[in-house]
Image (cartoon, grey):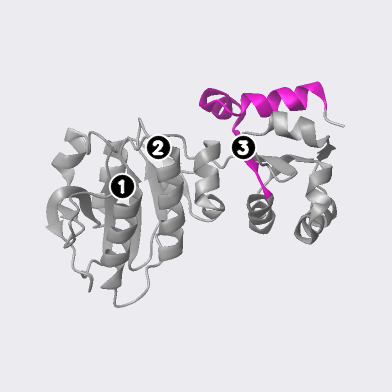
Amino acid sequence: MITRSQAKLIRRLKSRKRRDEEETFLLEGVRLVEELLASGWPVELAVTAPALADTARGRRLLESIKAVGWREAEVSNAELERLADTETPQGVLAVARRPRLRLAEFEPRGRAALLVFDRLADPGNLGTLVRAAHALGVAWAVALPGSVDAWNPKAVRASAGSLFRLPVSQESWPEVVTWLRQREFAILCADPEGVPVPRCGVQEDRFALVLGNEHSGLAHEVRRDCDRCVAVELPGDMDSLNVAIAGALLLDRLLAGAAEPPDGNT
C-alpha cells in the first residue's frame, strides 16, 4: 500500500525544481529498474503493480527487488498508471537518490574523452547522447547552465540505464575550461561549419567534445574558448543532422583514432 506522502513525492518528481529539492529522480519500466539494481545505486522506493508479474522477466525483477530489501509499495495497475510519466509503465517504477558529482573529483590517467552539453534543450537528445557516450568509452559528461536536467524522466529513459554508469555533473563553463586546460584537453566544438572529422578518426590523447543548443548552437563564451570546430562530413543530400546523431558520430570518429582505449578511471 502506498502512502499519501509517497504518492505526492512521485508526482513532485516530474518537476525539475522538486527533483533538485529532493535530490531524487523517478524512473519507470523493467529495463531501467533492472539497470538500477545492477548499478547498486541507493533507492528510496520501488512501486510495483500486479502487471509486473505478467511476464517471467517481470517476476524475476520482483524477486530481485524483494531480495535486495528496497522499500516497496504495492499498488493497483490503475494507480501505477496515474503515478507514472509514461503510458505503459510495465508495472514498476522507482525513486532513486541522485548523485552529487563534481568534475573536480575526476582525475584521468592517460587518454580520456569528455562530453559537454551547452544549453541542450531536449531530454531525449541528452539521454541518447549519454547512452552513446557510455557505449563509446567517454569518461565523464557535463551539463552547462541552461541545459535540460539529466534526471528528467525522458532523459533517463533515453539513456537506457547509461546515466547509472556514466558520471554527469552540472558545472559552469569557466570551471570546465579551467579543469580542461589544467589537464591539457583539446576543446572541440561541434559546428556545421567546422572541419569534417575523417572516418578513420583523429589522434587526440585528451579531448572534450562540446555540443550546443539544438536551435541556437554554441554560446559565444563557449565558442570563444574552443580550440577548433569539428563537423560530420555529409556526402549525401543532407545539410544537417539531429544533435544526438551528430554527437554520436563525432564521438565515434574522434575515438576511432585512438592508439589505446580511453581511460575512464579516477
Of 130 and 58, nearer the camera is 58
Q: Amino acid at mark 2?
A: Asp
For label 3, the residue is 86
Other residues around mark 1 within 10 Å, as few (<14) / some (14–19) / many (≥20): many
Name the front one of labels 3 and 1: 3
Q: Amino acid at mark 1?
A: Val
User: Label 1's element?
Assistant: helix
Other residues around mark 2 within 10 Å, as few (<14) / some (14–19) / many (≥20): some
Could you tell me residue 141's position as x and y percent? 40, 49
Q: Is residue 112 visible?
A: yes
Which region of the structure is painted magenta?
3-29
For label 2, the residue is 122
Instruction: Please report contact status of discs 2 and 3: CB closer than 8 Å, yes or no.
Output: no
Query: Where the N terminus falls, by quadrant?
Result: top right
Could you tell me residue 171's position as x and y percent? 37, 38
Q: Is residue 109 magenta?
A: no
- Above or below residue 232? Residue 218 is above
Instruction: Count the marks.
Output: 3
Residue found at the very far bottom of the displayed protein: 259
Instruction: Please report contact status of discs 1 and 2: CB closer than 8 Å, yes or no.
Output: yes
Could you tell me residue 51's position as x and y percent? 80, 45
The structure residue drawn at horizontal position 17% and vertical position 49%, both measured from the top left corner, is 192
The structure residue drawn at horizontal position 45% and vertical position 63%, both measured from the top left corner, is 135
Disc with the residue nearer the chain's start (2 vs 3): 3
